[in-house]
Image (spheres, rainbow, N blue to C red):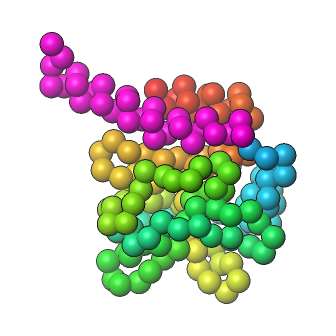
Amino acid sequence: MVSGQNSVRLAMVVLTCIFFVNPLLSFAAAPRDAGGWELGGAYDSLYNASELDKLKCRVVKVTEVVPMKGMSPGIALIVDDGDGEKITVHVGPKWFLGDSVAIKRGDRVKIRGSWAEIDGKDVFMASKIKKGDYYVLKVRLTKNGKPFWAMSPEELEAERAAAR
């Protein structure tokens, strides 16, 4: 029989594997052309890892977005920060994240990332999204902002190992 503490640890490991590693597994299906999401490109250069911010908010909508003209679609969250202000949060390219993330309307989340201005509008570019005690979706390295979708298979494996 598994003790209560051990069952909580087991649940944390399982959820980490499902929610953190799953997006990393889709990397193998990444297109040759990153569709404007490439490391060092115009969009990526808007992320400022030296000026990270945090949001505590409620998800209003999970949607598809094209961050800049000519880019391939990405996944975004529309969130309410509690003041009634709606904020658009860019999560990452759809070809990397798949059709869905385990976040839905009404979820309370904590998001770490960087503010950017795109086409005259403020957006929040996520590096990490946390929901509850066990769900964490990391899409960028906090230390330098490198997106997971631009990492080599070896770098992704190192991130997987660090999450275990």
Q: Is residue 49 above or below residue 122?
A: above
Task: Give me the residue at 53% from left, 47% from top.
Answer: 138
The verdict on residue 9 being magenta is: yes
Q: Is residue 18 left or right of residue 36?
A: left
Spot occupied by residue 61 in the image (x, y as percentages of width and height): 44, 70
26 relative position to 129: left or right? right
Q: Which residue lies at the image location 43% right of the left edge and 51% below the top edge? A: 102
**Placement of 28 over or under 70, stated as above or below:** above
- 18 lies above or below 92: above
Residue nearer the viewer, 34 or 5: 34
Q: Is residue 123 left or right of residue 147?
A: left
Q: Is residue 102 visible?
A: yes
Q: Main secondary structure of the magenta part?
A: helix
At a point 45% along the width and 36% down the height, the residue shown is 18
Q: Position of residue 135 (x, y in %)?
A: 38, 45
| Quadrant in which residue 133 is drawn | top left
Q: Taking 114 as reference, is 27 above or below it?
A: above
Residue, far right: 33
Q: Which residue occupies the foreground of this view, 29 or 14?
A: 29
Q: Mark yes or no: residue 56 visible.
A: no
Q: Residue 82 falls in which quadrant of the image? A: bottom left
Question: Quadrant where the N terminus lies?
Answer: top left
**Residue extent of the magenta highlight:** 1-29
Q: Furthest residue to the top?
A: 1
**Furthest-front residue in view?**
99
In depth, the one of 28 and 159 nearer the eye is 28
Q: Residue at x 79, y 47 (%)?
A: 31
| Badge count | 0
Q: Position of residue 26 (x, y in %)?
A: 64, 39
**Residue 105 left/right relative to 141:** left
